[in-house]
Image (cartoon, helix red, strand yellow):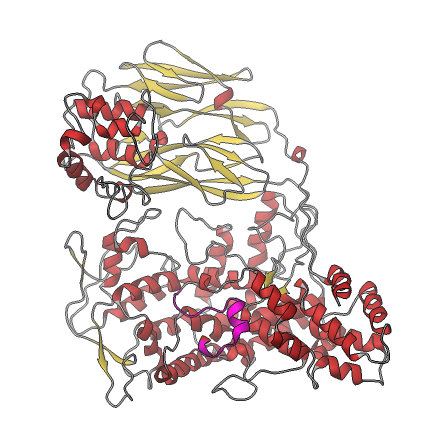
Amino acid sequence: MARLLKSVAICLSFLPGSLLFADPGLLRSADIVRLEVTPADDQQVIAIRTTDARQQIIVSAVHSDGSVTDVTRESVFSMSQEGIIRVDSTGLAIPMADGEIQLTATHAEKSASVRVTVSGFAHPLPINFRNQVVPVFTKLGCNGGGCHGKSGGQNGFKLSLLGFYPEDDFEFLRKESRGRRIFPGVPSESLLLRKAIGRSPHGGGRRMEQDSYEYGLLVRWIEQGMPYGSDSDPFVTQIRCVPDGRIMKRNSQQQIAVIATYSDGTTEDVTRMALFEPNDAEMAECSVTGLVTTHDLSGEVAIMARFQGQVATFRATLPLGADTSRMPEPGNLVDAAVFNKLKLLGIPTSEPCDDATFLRRVSLDVAGIMPTEAEVREFTADPAADKRDRLIDRLLDSPAYADHFANKWNFVLRNKKESGEDTPATMLFHRWLWNNFYDNKPYNEIVREIISASGDPMINPAVTWYRDVDSVEEQVEDTAQLFLGIRIQCARCHHHPFEKWSQDDYYGMAAFYNRVGKKVIPNASGNMRDRRVFHNEGAATASNPRSGKSLKPTGLGAPQPYDVSPEQDPRVRLADWMSDPQNPFFAKALVNRYWKHFFNRGIVEPEDDMRATNPPANPELLDALANRFIESGFDLKDLVRTICRSKTYQLSSLPNEFNGNDKQNFSRYYPRRLSAEVLYDAFHQVTGTSQSFGGMPTGTRAIQLADASNGPYFLQVFGQPKGDTACECERSMDANLAQSLHLLNGKEIQEKIAAETGRAAVLAKDSERSTEEKMSELYRWVFGREPNASEMETAVSYLKRNAENPRPGYEDILWALINTKEFQFNH
């Protein structure tokens, strides 16, 4: 058996793709035509307005082919007058005196100049706590969630998380342990500074050097009497990256600058105080000074810059530069967007998949079922050009499609039972979902009926959503994450660290749900979890627990709140806002979620974390799919049909020599392990056996279960979720040792492979057909394809060893095939 497993698995298992890269020489820079110096204003002036300001200079070389590269660190800087500014080797300009000069950068015998003005030395402004001191704490990590920014502070010193509440930080610094934390008489002896430079013991270690800019600024602030500033002082309203994007070579560098715009319209360079983070550390990294360094992978990577609660991104496009002239012609809007991006990146697509692969792939993706042996024979023999389109339509019209997607949504809608009394409502809600998907009810209507549900769950099953999504906070967070693709949980307690959402935004959403009432259903057999939901008439408001501000119902990012009369249900207004074609989140969140279902990666990844600092891998694709979804009337089947009919979806999963490392541009189909329920059903199909589930009709499949509590151990070990959260990440798709051991040695596995009426026994008893014919049938059941010559030879040779008693041989082969990646993965 072990010898067979080794030989069969080697030739049958799904093989990983090549890790080859294109020759970096495919991308060569042309001659330099000119230099450009940025960031300057419309008058080509760089203005430095305070003595504490610093300015990141960026020198770009424009080449004859139109490409642009960063040459800041290779340039030589000269000034028309000395003593006004100095520029270090990284391009950082530091003011020295008031004045105006001409700054010239020279590289490769090319030069470019820009006018620089410096002011503020004659009448220096006091240091502003909110705009200058708090960013130091953020940059050094002092107010992070793992240090003094956590809810209870650290070792008696507390700061607001990421400095979102500077007034609290200021009061705490001035009043708490004043003689120890801050020492105005001798600023350098302040405990705040001694610990940060390592002169006194500090659990966080040394955070800065004594000769650093940050240290000097804090000393000057204490010397000035620790001013806070006034409420009329300008504050940061937005930041931007300069440049905001660039096409770069792999293993190259690009300096970026971060420019803050204040409420009075002025701007300031805050590059050295900003925090940087790539959305894919395998593709690029960014230093604390804003220097982006790309790695070996091709694709697109975003660098998030964060300063004072504002965020911006720099996007680096890293072409591979391979020949894409043999790219297929686009078949629909999906292909147009994907192929355009691949041409830009120079990443050729894999070849189209064959008919057998497509049949198995789309059957599993759309309906959660393996094709039967007869379906494989009939489909591969069908010469019709439109057979793939007809197959997609047939699957969408099948009950199995509704089974599959009801299962998907049932868990993220948290439909689960905790006791036997929960069973009726749980079953009805699951069936309600099934009917909606089978009947193709528009998605916006499904969502509307869920969030605005009222009444008895026995009459209106959508009310069951409120059973486990019980509190206003859960309702807000599940609505945002599930239907808008936004993780707003952080904003419940503080400003979102990576997005624009504030506590006001959170509680403006909460106002939509604050009038939801619940009452016990009479004669409900003692079940206290199922309640009647109703609109409790009254003013729809929610209070920000920090500020005490009373907030009206307001959609995320909506320009103004809604005025909802006391007798109106505010949830109806929420549904109106969400399904409005102009809503920037609703349609995109759904199409991104479905795209991940079919490609194992969202256009935005994770699929429910859509934000400015986590940009889509292909914005054109996301927009095109969302617009199509809206124009179709939120037609889910049309969306599935559009995706599956695309040439992109029908590409092979086998990489070519260039796209083996492509993880985000969809140049090939990305294989993924079958979900627990689908794999369990597939196992029974290929072994010719069945499984009964307690309380369910005979013939029920795992994908049809309304609740995880009925599932066997197999489903648990392969990651079936419990329905505890609205996140699809609760379903584990990762492989582990327990799964391998269960498939290799599990009692259930062994018994069903060896079942008297199972597939192996039936094939062994069949004496009318040749071994080759029976083995071909087995492969069509397990892999949805014919065996190749090597596979056939291996299997037939093994069976000949014990021709008098072939059944154990068939059982061994079936066991070996089930333990291959080709069976366990969709590819």
Q: Is residue 383 visible?
A: no
**Relative height, residue 3 to residue 684 (above, below):** above
Q: What residue lies at 56% left-to-right and 75% top-to-bottom?
A: 396
Between 812 and 347, the one lying in front of the other is 812
Residue 671 sits in which quadrant? Answer: bottom right
Between 359 and 34, the one lying in front of the other is 359
Q: Which residue is situated farthest in the bottom direction here?
A: 523
Question: Can residue 820 be found in the magenta stretch?
Answer: no
Between 227 and 800, the one lying in front of the other is 800
Q: What residue lies at 41% left-to-right and 26% top-to-bottom?
A: 38
The chief SS type of the magenta part is loop
Quarter of the image containing the N terminus? bottom right
Which segment did they paint magenta?
Answer: 709-726
Q: Is residue 1 left or right of residue 749?
A: right
Q: Is residue 671 visible?
A: yes
Residue 791 lies, in percent from the top left, at: 80, 65
Residue 633 sits in which quadrant? Answer: bottom left
Residue 134 lies, in percent from the top left, at: 25, 35
Q: Is residue 341 left or right of residue 153?
A: right
Between 608 and 627, the one lying in front of the other is 608
Q: What residue lies at 25% left-to-right and 27% top-to-bottom?
A: 193
Question: Can residue 716 be found in the magenta stretch?
Answer: yes
**Relative height, residue 303 to residue 290 (above, below):** below
Q: How many marks?
A: 0
Residue 316 lies, in percent from the top left, at: 50, 39
